[in-house]
Each structure stands twice: as C-alpha cells, then as structure tokens.
Image (cartoon, rainbow, N blue to C red):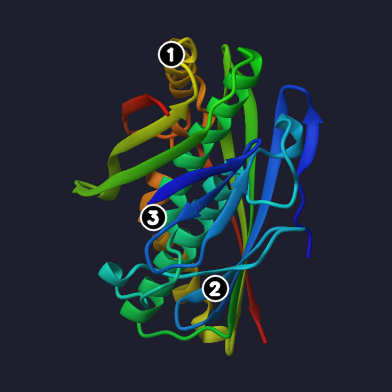
Amino acid sequence: MRVVWTGGKSGDVLVSNKPTIRTGSPPEFGGTKEFHSPEDLFVASASVCFMNSFVVFTEKMHIRFESFEVEAKGLLEKVGQSYEITHLHMKTKVVIESEDLRSKMARALELGAKYCYVANSMKCPKEYENEIVVR
Amino acid sequence: MCIQVRILSQESHEYHVQVDWTDDGVGDLLIEGKPTTKVSAPPEFEGPEGIISPEDLFVAAATSCFMTTFATFSKRMRFDFESFSCQGTGTLEKLERGFEFTKLLLKTRVVVDSKETKPKAERALELAAKYCLVSNSMKCPTEHENIVIVG
C-alpha cells in the first residue's frame, strides 16, 4: 500500500483495487477532523480483525448469529517523550436466536479475541466486554 | 450509537470506532463524522476481493502516522516539501500462538525544491520514525528506507 501526501497533514491511503481512504492528523494534533486519523485506523484494525476472527470461529463451530457489533476505544497516553496507545477496550454485542447458543457464542468470542492477530501485534493490553442477547 | 474522540487532557486522548457486521464477514467501519468504510477479511483468509481488511488498516495506521509525524516535524523545522509518498509493507507470520505482524517496512520518497532543504527533510524523516506513535504501539520492528530528492 502507499500513502501519498495531499497537503497539510493529510494524505491518501492507496491499496490496490480497494477504495481510497483519506487520512490525516486528528484535530488534537493540528489536523482536520473529517479524515480517518492514524489513531482511528489503529483502533479500527484491531476491532475489524476481532470481528473476522469471531466470524471464523462461528463457522468452525457451525453456529449462527443474528448480528454483531463492536464499539472499540483506544487510549493514547504520553509515555516518556512520546505517545503510545496504552489500552484497547472492545465492547461487543452479539444477538442470537436461542438461549442454547449462548455458551458456544461466548466461546467463539473468547477464541476470536485470543487469536486476533492484529491485537496480538500490538503492545497494549486489551479488554473485552461481551454481551450476548437472545432476540 | 456512541462514537467519539474525547480529549481527556493534553497528554491523553481516546479514539472510538464502531464495527457493525453486515453479512458474511463484511462489516461497516463507523467513525463519527467520517466516511463509512466497508471492511472484511482479506482473500488469503477467505474474504472477498476489493474490500479493506484489518491487515490493510494496521499497515495503513503506521504508514499514515509516519506521514503526519513527518508533516509535523517539517512545520516545526520550518521547511516545505513538494511531495511525500510512502509505501508500507507489513509481514504477517505464523508464530507459536497464531499469526502476528513481525515486520513493517516503510519506503519513503520525499521531494524538496532545494539542496539546502535536503538535510532538514532527512532529519525530519528520522525524527518522524522515532516519534511515530502508532509504530511505537506495535510489537514488531519498523524498518525505514528513505530517499530525499531535489526536484
């Protein structure tokens, strides 16, 4: 992939055959607020990987879910002279059809988190808060 | 739906994103006030073609952070550059406990308009690598190959 500067603190993320992502510094670091900041992309990469990893385990376990959503929060803190993302929190809600799927779904969420390789490539601790709701 | 970037203090910030599964492993990445992006697993992990994957986002986070950090240092050092282009490559490898990114390679090309600016741009690239907060938050090492050209 390539990142090409377009002016100020903004640029385009170009991945071949995929939609362009406009990126830039967030307002708190002197940029604009309408583009995805690198910090957004960082938090997004972990949460999307978690979703994919969860989906893979539900397929392996032959279980179906109605909906999945995750709200992820990354905390950026000053560490020494520089900044680092020091904590990731993922709040997930999965809707299922019947109560007897609950324990399997909880297991798929657990395994999804354990084998999420993007999160495993990050230094910070990750915290998961899972809610499973019967429709 | 609560997605927000909340400024806690000068020294810490929070980033909120939401991912909603839509169907068959494809989801919407939602960040308040920003364009919605379709996301999925990459084809090598049985995802569809042409959709942004978490692996793309991971490498993009480091690459765009390097760019914005470089832009910040160029302002502080009061020099202008003509263009900046960075090619980011992440290596995902199977380790004992599963896959992990083991290396990031960022190849950067900066064009400046005079010979005098060249060492400044080189220094700004060095500082940007050192202070890129996204790569500093990743476990794997980041390698840089920089070229500064007088255009």
User: Image check: B105 left or right of B64?
Assistant: left
Where residue A3 appears, as percent x and y from the top left, is 46, 46
Name the residue beneath numbered marker 2: B27
- Residue pictured at 41% horizontal, 46% vertical: B59
Q: Which chain letter goes with mark 1? A: B
**Contact, mark 3 vs mark 1 (Cβ under 8 Å):** no
User: Image check: A127 left or right of B129?
Assistant: right
User: Image check: A113 left or right of B6?
Assistant: left
What kind of element bears circle 1?
loop
B94 up-or-down from B70: above or below: below
Q: Nearer the viewer, mark 3 or mark 1?
A: 1
Name the residue beneath numbered marker 3: B55
The residues bearing labels 2 and 3 have C-alpha atoms spaced at a distance of 15 Å
Name the residue beneath numbered marker 1: B115
Where residue A55 appears, as percent x and y from the top left, is 43, 74
Q: What amino acid type should be assigned to the residue bearing mark 3? A: Glu
> Of marks 3 and 1, which one's residue comes earlier in the chain?
3
> Of marks 1 and 2, which one's residue comes earlier in the chain?
2
Residue B89, by quadrant, is top left
Marks 2, 3 in one chain: yes
B14 up-or-down from A128: above or below: above
Q: What amino acid type should be assigned to the residue bearing mark 1? A: Lys
